[in-house]
Amino acid sequence: MQRPSFVAITSIAASAILLSACSKKEEAAPVAAEPAVAEAPKTIDPAKFLKQPLVSEIYTADPSAHVFNGKIWIYGSHDIDAPAQEGDGGAFVMRDYQPISMDSINGPATVHPVALDIADVPWAGRQMWAPDAAEKDGKYFLYFPVKDKQDVFRIGVAVGDNPAGPFKAQPEAIKNSFSMDPAVFKDTDGKYYMYFGGIWGGQLQRWKSGEYKADDDSQPPNDEPALLPFVARMADDMLEFAEKPKAVKIVDENGKLLLSSDHDRRFFEASWVHKYKGNYYFSYSTGDTHFIAYAMGKSPYGPFTYKGKILEPVLGWTNHHSITEVDGKWYLFYHDSQNSNGATHLRNIKQPVEIQYNDDGTIQTIDPYQEDPPAAPAAPAAPAAPAA
Ligand code: FUB
Protein backbone atom coordinates (compact mmCIF):
# COMPACT_ATOMS: atom_id res chain seq x y z
CA MET A 1 0.00 0.00 0.00
CA GLN A 2 1.49 3.31 -1.04
CA ARG A 3 0.81 6.57 0.68
CA PRO A 4 3.28 9.15 -0.46
CA SER A 5 0.78 11.95 -0.58
CA PHE A 6 -0.49 11.38 2.95
CA VAL A 7 2.94 10.99 4.41
CA ALA A 8 3.88 14.20 2.71
CA ILE A 9 0.81 15.94 4.07
CA THR A 10 1.42 14.82 7.62
CA SER A 11 5.10 15.59 7.54
CA ILE A 12 4.42 18.97 6.07
CA ALA A 13 1.75 19.83 8.60
CA ALA A 14 3.91 18.58 11.38
CA SER A 15 7.16 20.20 10.52
CA ALA A 16 5.80 23.47 9.23
CA ILE A 17 3.21 24.18 11.86
CA LEU A 18 4.65 22.63 14.91
CA LEU A 19 8.35 23.16 15.12
CA SER A 20 8.60 19.46 15.01
CA ALA A 21 9.93 17.17 17.65
CA CYS A 22 13.52 16.85 17.09
CA SER A 23 13.67 18.97 14.01
CA LYS A 24 17.12 20.27 13.50
CA LYS A 25 18.80 19.60 10.20
CA GLU A 26 22.02 17.67 10.31
CA GLU A 27 25.05 19.11 8.67
CA ALA A 28 26.16 16.05 6.82
CA ALA A 29 23.25 13.84 5.97
CA PRO A 30 20.37 14.85 3.68
CA VAL A 31 16.93 15.41 5.11
CA ALA A 32 13.59 16.07 3.47
CA ALA A 33 13.08 19.69 2.50
CA GLU A 34 10.74 21.59 4.76
CA PRO A 35 7.82 23.38 3.12
CA ALA A 36 7.85 27.12 2.92
CA VAL A 37 4.20 27.57 3.85
CA ALA A 38 2.39 26.05 6.82
CA GLU A 39 -0.74 24.10 6.02
CA ALA A 40 -3.85 24.21 8.14
CA PRO A 41 -4.60 21.10 10.20
CA LYS A 42 -6.67 18.48 8.41
CA THR A 43 -9.65 16.63 9.81
CA ILE A 44 -9.02 12.98 9.13
CA ASP A 45 -11.79 10.40 8.98
CA PRO A 46 -11.32 8.10 12.04
CA ALA A 47 -12.22 5.13 9.86
CA LYS A 48 -8.95 5.55 7.99
CA PHE A 49 -6.91 4.56 11.03
CA LEU A 50 -6.04 1.00 11.95
CA LYS A 51 -6.61 1.77 15.64
CA GLN A 52 -8.32 4.51 17.63
CA PRO A 53 -6.94 6.71 20.44
CA LEU A 54 -6.72 4.81 23.70
CA VAL A 55 -7.77 7.83 25.78
CA SER A 56 -8.85 11.30 24.78
CA GLU A 57 -9.17 13.26 28.02
CA ILE A 58 -5.50 14.23 27.86
CA TYR A 59 -2.88 14.12 25.12
CA THR A 60 -0.51 11.18 25.56
CA ALA A 61 2.53 9.85 23.68
CA ASP A 62 5.60 7.59 23.75
CA PRO A 63 3.88 4.55 25.33
CA SER A 64 6.05 2.19 27.36
CA ALA A 65 3.77 -0.73 28.21
CA HIS A 66 4.27 -3.41 30.88
CA VAL A 67 2.23 -6.02 32.67
CA PHE A 68 2.46 -5.54 36.44
CA ASN A 69 0.38 -7.79 38.71
CA GLY A 70 -1.75 -8.99 35.81
CA LYS A 71 -2.71 -5.48 34.70
CA ILE A 72 -1.42 -3.52 31.71
CA TRP A 73 0.35 -0.31 32.69
CA ILE A 74 1.40 2.29 30.16
CA TYR A 75 3.91 4.99 31.02
CA GLY A 76 4.04 7.75 28.45
CA SER A 77 4.58 11.42 27.86
CA HIS A 78 1.78 13.82 28.79
CA ASP A 79 1.69 16.29 25.90
CA ILE A 80 0.45 19.80 26.60
CA ASP A 81 -0.58 22.68 24.39
CA ALA A 82 1.79 25.40 25.52
CA PRO A 83 4.09 27.82 23.70
CA ALA A 84 7.15 26.20 22.19
CA GLN A 85 10.38 26.80 24.04
CA GLU A 86 13.86 27.42 22.76
CA GLY A 87 15.85 24.70 21.00
CA ASP A 88 15.30 21.54 18.99
CA GLY A 89 12.17 19.73 20.09
CA GLY A 90 11.12 22.94 21.86
CA ALA A 91 7.44 22.21 21.14
CA PHE A 92 7.59 19.33 23.63
CA VAL A 93 7.26 21.16 26.91
CA MET A 94 5.78 18.39 29.03
CA ARG A 95 5.80 18.74 32.82
CA ASP A 96 4.44 15.55 34.37
CA TYR A 97 3.49 11.91 33.95
CA GLN A 98 0.09 10.23 34.26
CA PRO A 99 0.16 6.42 34.01
CA ILE A 100 -2.60 4.62 32.13
CA SER A 101 -3.89 1.17 33.08
CA MET A 102 -6.03 -1.48 31.38
CA ASP A 103 -7.42 -4.71 32.79
CA SER A 104 -7.34 -6.37 29.39
CA ILE A 105 -5.92 -5.64 25.98
CA ASN A 106 -9.27 -4.69 24.43
CA GLY A 107 -10.77 -3.18 27.55
CA PRO A 108 -11.16 0.46 28.56
CA ALA A 109 -8.16 2.45 29.70
CA THR A 110 -7.95 4.51 32.90
CA VAL A 111 -5.84 7.65 33.14
CA HIS A 112 -4.41 7.96 36.64
CA PRO A 113 -3.58 11.20 38.46
CA VAL A 114 -0.17 12.84 38.12
CA ALA A 115 2.41 10.37 39.41
CA LEU A 116 5.43 12.63 39.08
CA ASP A 117 5.56 16.38 38.51
CA ILE A 118 8.60 18.30 37.32
CA ALA A 119 8.27 20.53 40.39
CA ASP A 120 9.11 17.50 42.52
CA VAL A 121 12.36 16.67 40.74
CA PRO A 122 15.01 18.77 42.49
CA TRP A 123 17.51 18.78 39.63
CA ALA A 124 15.05 19.23 36.73
CA GLY A 125 14.94 22.22 34.44
CA ARG A 126 12.44 21.62 31.64
CA GLN A 127 10.88 19.14 29.22
CA MET A 128 9.89 15.77 30.66
CA TRP A 129 10.08 13.44 27.68
CA ALA A 130 9.44 9.75 27.04
CA PRO A 131 9.60 7.65 30.25
CA ASP A 132 9.66 3.96 31.09
CA ALA A 133 9.08 1.95 34.25
CA ALA A 134 10.21 -1.29 35.86
CA GLU A 135 9.16 -3.40 38.82
CA LYS A 136 11.55 -5.18 41.16
CA ASP A 137 10.78 -6.84 44.48
CA GLY A 138 7.47 -5.02 44.84
CA LYS A 139 8.92 -1.56 44.18
CA TYR A 140 8.16 0.44 41.04
CA PHE A 141 10.71 2.59 39.30
CA LEU A 142 9.79 5.38 36.91
CA TYR A 143 12.66 6.36 34.61
CA PHE A 144 12.37 9.72 32.92
CA PRO A 145 14.46 12.05 30.77
CA VAL A 146 14.39 15.73 31.58
CA LYS A 147 16.74 18.62 30.92
CA ASP A 148 18.64 19.64 34.02
CA LYS A 149 19.12 23.22 35.12
CA GLN A 150 22.03 23.55 32.67
CA ASP A 151 19.68 22.42 29.86
CA VAL A 152 21.39 19.05 29.45
CA PHE A 153 19.17 15.98 29.08
CA ARG A 154 19.75 13.47 31.90
CA ILE A 155 17.80 10.44 33.01
CA GLY A 156 16.21 10.37 36.42
CA VAL A 157 14.51 7.72 38.50
CA ALA A 158 11.61 8.00 40.92
CA VAL A 159 10.42 5.22 43.21
CA GLY A 160 6.93 4.16 44.29
CA ASP A 161 5.05 1.33 46.01
CA ASN A 162 2.31 1.18 43.41
CA PRO A 163 2.41 1.09 39.58
CA ALA A 164 0.13 4.15 39.54
CA GLY A 165 2.55 6.08 41.71
CA PRO A 166 3.06 8.50 43.30
CA PHE A 167 6.78 8.26 42.59
CA LYS A 168 9.43 10.05 44.62
CA ALA A 169 12.35 11.32 42.59
CA GLN A 170 15.91 10.67 43.65
CA PRO A 171 17.74 13.88 44.53
CA GLU A 172 20.01 13.63 41.49
CA ALA A 173 19.97 12.22 37.99
CA ILE A 174 21.39 8.73 37.39
CA LYS A 175 25.18 9.05 37.36
CA ASN A 176 26.68 8.80 33.84
CA SER A 177 23.25 9.15 32.25
CA PHE A 178 22.83 11.44 29.27
CA SER A 179 20.46 12.08 26.37
CA MET A 180 16.90 10.72 26.59
CA ASP A 181 14.27 8.04 25.88
CA PRO A 182 15.18 5.45 28.55
CA ALA A 183 13.78 1.94 28.09
CA VAL A 184 14.37 -0.68 30.77
CA PHE A 185 14.39 -4.34 29.76
CA LYS A 186 14.24 -7.22 32.25
CA ASP A 187 16.02 -10.26 30.87
CA THR A 188 14.90 -13.80 31.60
CA ASP A 189 17.84 -14.20 34.02
CA GLY A 190 16.48 -11.36 36.17
CA LYS A 191 19.02 -8.71 35.08
CA TYR A 192 17.78 -5.28 34.04
CA TYR A 193 19.27 -3.11 31.31
CA MET A 194 18.59 0.48 30.37
CA TYR A 195 18.77 1.53 26.72
CA PHE A 196 18.76 5.22 25.92
CA GLY A 197 19.71 8.00 23.54
CA GLY A 198 18.30 10.14 20.79
CA ILE A 199 19.81 12.45 18.19
CA TRP A 200 18.90 16.05 17.21
CA GLY A 201 16.65 17.33 20.05
CA GLY A 202 17.74 14.37 22.16
CA GLN A 203 21.31 15.78 22.30
CA LEU A 204 23.14 12.47 21.71
CA GLN A 205 25.40 14.16 19.12
CA ARG A 206 26.67 16.53 21.80
CA TRP A 207 28.33 13.54 23.53
CA LYS A 208 30.34 12.33 20.51
CA SER A 209 33.61 13.06 22.27
CA GLY A 210 32.50 11.42 25.51
CA GLU A 211 31.97 14.85 27.06
CA TYR A 212 29.04 17.21 26.63
CA LYS A 213 29.60 19.91 24.02
CA ALA A 214 26.61 22.26 23.90
CA ASP A 215 27.63 23.86 20.63
CA ASP A 216 28.32 20.67 18.67
CA ASP A 217 25.14 19.45 17.01
CA SER A 218 26.87 17.92 13.99
CA GLN A 219 26.20 14.36 12.93
CA PRO A 220 28.96 12.09 11.60
CA PRO A 221 29.72 12.53 7.88
CA ASN A 222 27.50 10.54 5.50
CA ASP A 223 30.04 7.79 4.86
CA GLU A 224 30.76 7.18 8.56
CA PRO A 225 28.73 5.12 11.03
CA ALA A 226 25.65 6.77 12.47
CA LEU A 227 25.51 7.62 16.15
CA LEU A 228 24.47 4.69 18.30
CA PRO A 229 22.17 4.27 21.29
CA PHE A 230 23.61 3.18 24.63
CA VAL A 231 22.97 0.39 27.12
CA ALA A 232 23.93 -0.12 30.74
CA ARG A 233 23.01 -2.89 33.16
CA MET A 234 21.16 -1.56 36.19
CA ALA A 235 22.56 -1.87 39.70
CA ASP A 236 20.74 -4.15 42.12
CA ASP A 237 18.95 -1.17 43.70
CA MET A 238 17.72 -0.05 40.22
CA LEU A 239 18.78 3.51 41.06
CA GLU A 240 22.13 3.63 39.24
CA PHE A 241 23.97 1.99 36.38
CA ALA A 242 26.08 -1.01 37.36
CA GLU A 243 28.56 -0.19 34.60
CA LYS A 244 29.64 2.52 32.21
CA PRO A 245 27.16 2.75 29.33
CA LYS A 246 28.25 1.00 26.13
CA ALA A 247 27.27 1.79 22.55
CA VAL A 248 24.69 -0.59 21.03
CA LYS A 249 25.86 -1.64 17.58
CA ILE A 250 23.23 -1.81 14.83
CA VAL A 251 24.69 -3.47 11.74
CA ASP A 252 23.54 -4.43 8.27
CA GLU A 253 23.38 -7.97 6.85
CA ASN A 254 27.16 -7.83 6.23
CA GLY A 255 27.94 -6.90 9.81
CA LYS A 256 28.75 -3.27 8.95
CA LEU A 257 27.49 -0.45 11.15
CA LEU A 258 24.64 1.50 9.56
CA LEU A 259 25.86 4.75 8.06
CA SER A 260 24.97 8.28 9.02
CA SER A 261 23.46 8.84 5.55
CA ASP A 262 21.14 5.85 5.91
CA HIS A 263 18.16 7.74 7.30
CA ASP A 264 15.75 4.92 6.46
CA ARG A 265 17.54 2.54 8.82
CA ARG A 266 19.82 4.35 11.23
CA PHE A 267 18.93 4.90 14.91
CA PHE A 268 17.29 8.21 15.81
CA GLU A 269 15.45 7.73 19.18
CA ALA A 270 12.87 5.60 21.04
CA SER A 271 14.88 2.50 21.99
CA TRP A 272 12.96 -0.58 23.06
CA VAL A 273 14.13 -4.16 23.70
CA HIS A 274 12.08 -7.32 23.97
CA LYS A 275 12.97 -10.99 23.85
CA TYR A 276 11.08 -13.59 21.86
CA LYS A 277 12.07 -17.25 21.48
CA GLY A 278 15.62 -16.57 22.66
CA ASN A 279 16.26 -13.64 20.30
CA TYR A 280 16.71 -10.06 21.48
CA TYR A 281 14.90 -7.44 19.43
CA PHE A 282 16.15 -3.87 19.51
CA SER A 283 13.52 -1.56 18.01
CA TYR A 284 13.70 2.19 17.52
CA SER A 285 12.47 5.19 15.59
CA THR A 286 14.29 6.37 12.47
CA GLY A 287 13.14 9.93 13.26
CA ASP A 288 13.11 12.02 10.10
CA THR A 289 12.05 9.02 7.99
CA HIS A 290 9.37 8.22 10.57
CA PHE A 291 9.64 4.42 10.76
CA ILE A 292 9.76 2.07 13.72
CA ALA A 293 12.60 -0.22 12.69
CA TYR A 294 14.08 -3.26 14.40
CA ALA A 295 17.23 -5.31 14.56
CA MET A 296 17.83 -8.76 16.06
CA GLY A 297 20.66 -10.06 18.22
CA LYS A 298 21.76 -12.80 20.58
CA SER A 299 22.76 -10.69 23.60
CA PRO A 300 21.20 -7.73 25.41
CA TYR A 301 24.33 -5.78 24.48
CA GLY A 302 24.04 -6.56 20.76
CA PRO A 303 25.27 -6.34 18.12
CA PHE A 304 21.85 -6.18 16.50
CA THR A 305 21.36 -6.89 12.82
CA TYR A 306 18.87 -4.65 11.03
CA LYS A 307 15.83 -6.65 9.88
CA GLY A 308 13.19 -4.21 8.73
CA LYS A 309 10.27 -2.04 9.76
CA ILE A 310 7.69 -2.80 12.41
CA LEU A 311 5.55 0.28 11.83
CA GLU A 312 5.12 2.62 8.88
CA PRO A 313 4.90 6.40 9.49
CA VAL A 314 1.94 7.59 11.56
CA LEU A 315 0.06 10.89 11.52
CA GLY A 316 2.47 13.43 13.04
CA TRP A 317 6.25 13.72 12.88
CA THR A 318 7.30 11.44 15.72
CA ASN A 319 6.94 7.68 15.86
CA HIS A 320 7.55 5.97 19.21
CA HIS A 321 6.44 2.59 20.47
CA SER A 322 6.85 -0.34 22.85
CA ILE A 323 6.32 -4.07 22.42
CA THR A 324 4.92 -6.17 25.24
CA GLU A 325 3.60 -9.68 25.78
CA VAL A 326 0.07 -9.86 27.19
CA ASP A 327 -1.54 -13.25 27.80
CA GLY A 328 0.79 -15.02 25.39
CA LYS A 329 0.38 -12.57 22.51
CA TRP A 330 2.69 -9.73 21.55
CA TYR A 331 1.42 -6.19 21.08
CA LEU A 332 2.73 -2.98 19.62
CA PHE A 333 1.83 0.19 21.52
CA TYR A 334 2.33 3.41 19.53
CA HIS A 335 1.00 6.92 19.14
CA ASP A 336 -0.07 9.33 16.46
CA SER A 337 -1.70 12.77 16.32
CA GLN A 338 -5.24 11.77 15.36
CA ASN A 339 -6.96 13.71 18.17
CA SER A 340 -5.21 16.95 17.21
CA ASN A 341 -5.57 16.37 13.47
CA GLY A 342 -1.85 16.12 12.99
CA ALA A 343 -0.32 18.46 15.57
CA THR A 344 3.03 16.85 16.20
CA HIS A 345 3.32 18.00 19.81
CA LEU A 346 -0.24 16.89 20.72
CA ARG A 347 -0.32 13.14 20.38
CA ASN A 348 -2.48 10.26 21.54
CA ILE A 349 -1.48 6.74 22.40
CA LYS A 350 -3.46 4.29 20.28
CA GLN A 351 -5.16 1.00 21.05
CA PRO A 352 -2.54 -1.75 20.91
CA VAL A 353 -2.13 -3.87 17.79
CA GLU A 354 -0.99 -7.48 17.84
CA ILE A 355 2.30 -8.11 16.09
CA GLN A 356 2.86 -11.17 13.92
CA TYR A 357 6.15 -13.05 13.74
CA ASN A 358 7.28 -15.00 10.72
CA ASP A 359 8.77 -18.48 11.16
CA ASP A 360 12.31 -17.06 11.07
CA GLY A 361 11.51 -14.65 13.91
CA THR A 362 11.19 -11.56 11.73
CA ILE A 363 8.22 -9.28 12.32
CA GLN A 364 5.53 -8.34 9.83
CA THR A 365 5.29 -4.61 9.12
CA ILE A 366 2.19 -2.85 10.44
CA ASP A 367 0.42 -0.14 8.48
CA PRO A 368 -1.26 2.36 10.83
CA TYR A 369 -4.00 3.00 8.27
CA GLN A 370 -6.92 0.80 7.27
CA GLU A 371 -6.74 1.72 3.64
CA ASP A 372 -4.96 4.02 1.23
CA PRO A 373 -4.14 7.45 2.57
CA PRO A 374 -7.04 9.83 2.86
CA ALA A 375 -7.17 12.83 0.58
CA ALA A 376 -6.89 16.18 2.31
CA PRO A 377 -10.34 17.30 3.44
CA ALA A 378 -11.90 20.23 1.65
CA ALA A 379 -12.12 22.55 4.62
CA PRO A 380 -9.50 22.71 7.35
CA ALA A 381 -10.92 22.37 10.84
CA ALA A 382 -9.68 23.46 14.22
CA PRO A 383 -7.90 20.72 16.15
CA ALA A 384 -9.88 18.80 18.71
CA ALA A 385 -8.86 19.97 22.14
CA PRO A 386 -8.77 17.49 24.96
CA ALA A 387 -7.88 19.12 28.23
CA ALA A 388 -4.18 19.24 28.94
O1 FUB B 1 7.94 13.09 23.46
C1 FUB B 1 9.10 13.82 23.22
C2 FUB B 1 9.99 13.11 22.28
O2 FUB B 1 9.34 12.92 21.04
C3 FUB B 1 10.34 11.71 22.70
O3 FUB B 1 11.26 11.66 23.74
C4 FUB B 1 10.78 11.18 21.42
O4 FUB B 1 10.95 9.80 21.38
C5 FUB B 1 9.68 11.68 20.50
O5 FUB B 1 8.55 10.84 20.53
Image (spheres, rainbow, N blue to C red):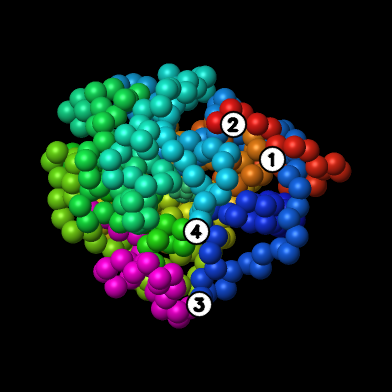
Q: Which of marks 3 and 2 is nearer the N terminus?
A: 3
- Residue type at tag 1: Asn
Mark 4 lies on residue: 87
How packed mark 1 is, by other alpha carbons closer than 10 Å (few <14, some 14-19, many 20 or more), is many
Mark 3 lies on residue: 28
The prevailing secondary structure element of the residues shown in magenta is loop
Q: Note whether residue 107 is visible.
A: yes
Between residue 50 and residue 98, name the one nearer to us: 98
Q: Is mark 3 on a helix, strand or loop?
A: loop
Would residue 179 be found to the left or right of residue 35 on screen? left
Quarter of the figure with residue 65: top left
How many angstroms separate mark 1 from mark 4 (CA)?
24 Å
- Residue type at tag 4: Gly
Q: Note whether residue 3 is visible.
A: no
How many angstroms separate mark 3 from mark 2 (CA)?
37 Å
State whether label 1 is within 8 Å of ligand 1.
no
Identify the residue shown where x is 26% and y is 36%. Answer: 169
Q: Which of marks 1 and 3 is nearer the N terminus?
A: 3
- Residue type at tag 2: Pro
Q: Residue furthest right?
A: 378
- Residue 53 is marked as 2
Segment colored magenta: 206-234
Mark 1 lies on residue: 341
Between residue 283 and residue 11, name the one nearer to us: 11
Q: Can you say whether 149 is above or below 341 in the image?
A: below
Identify the residue shown where x is 61% and y is 29%. Answer: 386
Residue 344 screen position, x and y as percent: 60, 47
Q: Is mark 4 on a helix, strand or loop?
A: loop
- Residue type at tag 3: Ala
Q: What element carries label 2?
A: loop
Q: Earlier in the sequence, mark 1 or mark 4?
A: 4
